Image: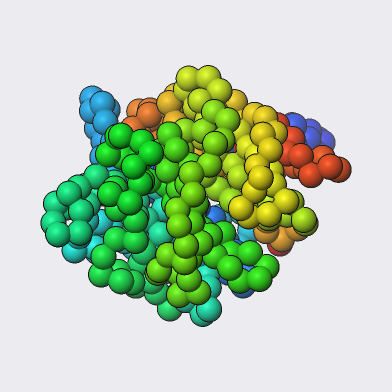
Amino acid sequence: MQKTWLIALLALVAYLPLQAQNPIIKDVFTADPAPLVYRDTLFLYTGHDTASVQETNYKMPDWRIYSTTDMVHWKSYGTRLSPRTFAWATGDAYAAQCVYHNGKFYWFVSTFHKKDDNSQGGAAIGVAVSDRPTGPFKDAIGKALIVNEMTKDKPHAWDDIDPTVFIDDDKQAYLYWGNLSCRWVKLKDNLTELAGPITVLNIKNYIEGPWVYKRKKLYYLVYASAGTKPEMIEYCTAPSATGPWTYRGIIQENVPNSFTTHPGIIDYKGKSYFFYHNGSLPTGGSYRRSICVDELHYNKDGSIQKIVQTTTGVAPVK
């Protein structure tokens, strides 16, 4: 009798819903995910929301790092960088991305610039560097890489945010960024100097948060869009890192309880993953966001299938 009861109980457990994995980080509010695979580990670089429930604007004091080797268990390294790292910076820690190049890790960040001889203020992009994926990081050049005065196609002061860096097969590095205007520029091999003029792209429905990568022979530009309000995720593809970019459509609909969303796409251990943020944690919202991850799938022609947002998240990998 007892054995029969145990078998029935195990059968019932097998049919119970899986425990909700998304959001993947539950102890603090995180935003703007940027994954990086180094050796056998996936590192996740994030923003950090600390606004109160009553506040109606962002409060983002620092950037954080997490890692996983199975996509389910995440190790926290805590705060590893902040605007205070940069003597020229002031304000919040907006979206950022870390890339590996020539034996070093370069963390491209967006924040705001103090009024000084180099800039009269506004959003700016800086670069921190480290010998290890978890730091310590230091300002790589002692000044901003991009300041507001370098980009005049938009009048607002917060247009130089959300950097993403793509390094092509020939080792040429490209920086893409911008709010309401998507821009790109070649970088020198040291990743701390521009190697050409800044080009403004005409991308359908573009708002912010670009993410650029290559799969097989196709280049992808994925971004937060104005297809509806709140933001969705749309994308373009191109035959090269410089275009021409062809609009391909919407891949992620609005997320729960957050006006913004932000893409981060990467392959790891044979699967493709789509990182994003929403406001689904208790007391969460547009200024108290949380990072999630779901699988990403492609069609045979390289187009991206619609992202299915889940609370269960992704299965563990070995």
Q: Tell me where residue 127 appears, x and y as whole percent.
A: 36, 64
Residue at x-position 54% and y-position 65%:
173
Say which of 28 and 4 sits in front: 28
Q: In the picture, which quadrant includes the N terminus?
A: top right
Q: Tell me where residue 285 appears, x and y as whole percent.
A: 38, 28
Q: Tell me where residue 313 appears, x and y as whole percent.
A: 62, 40
Q: For the image shown, how many numbered marks are present on the structure?
A: 0
Q: Residue furthest right?
A: 300
Residue at x-position 29% and y-position 34%:
156
Q: Tell me where residue 269 appears, x and y as whole percent.
A: 71, 61
Say which of 4 and 176 sits in front: 176
Colour scheme employed for the rendering of this structure: rainbow
Q: Quadrant of residue 296?
A: top right
Residue at x-position 40% and y-position 69%:
192
Residue at x-position 64% and y-position 29%:
250
Above or below residue 213? Residue 284 is above
Q: Is 268 positioned to the left or the right of 191 in the image? A: right
Q: Residue furthest top?
A: 228
Above or below residue 305? Residue 192 is below
Q: Quadrant of residue 136?
A: bottom left
Q: In the picture, which quadrant includes the C terminus?
A: bottom right
Q: Is residue 254 visible?
A: no
Q: Is 172 positioned to the left or the right of 3 in the image? A: left
Say which of 40 and 261 sits in front: 261
Q: Is 117 positioned to the left or the right of 228 in the image? A: left
Q: Residue furthest left?
A: 116
Q: Is residue 222 visible?
A: yes
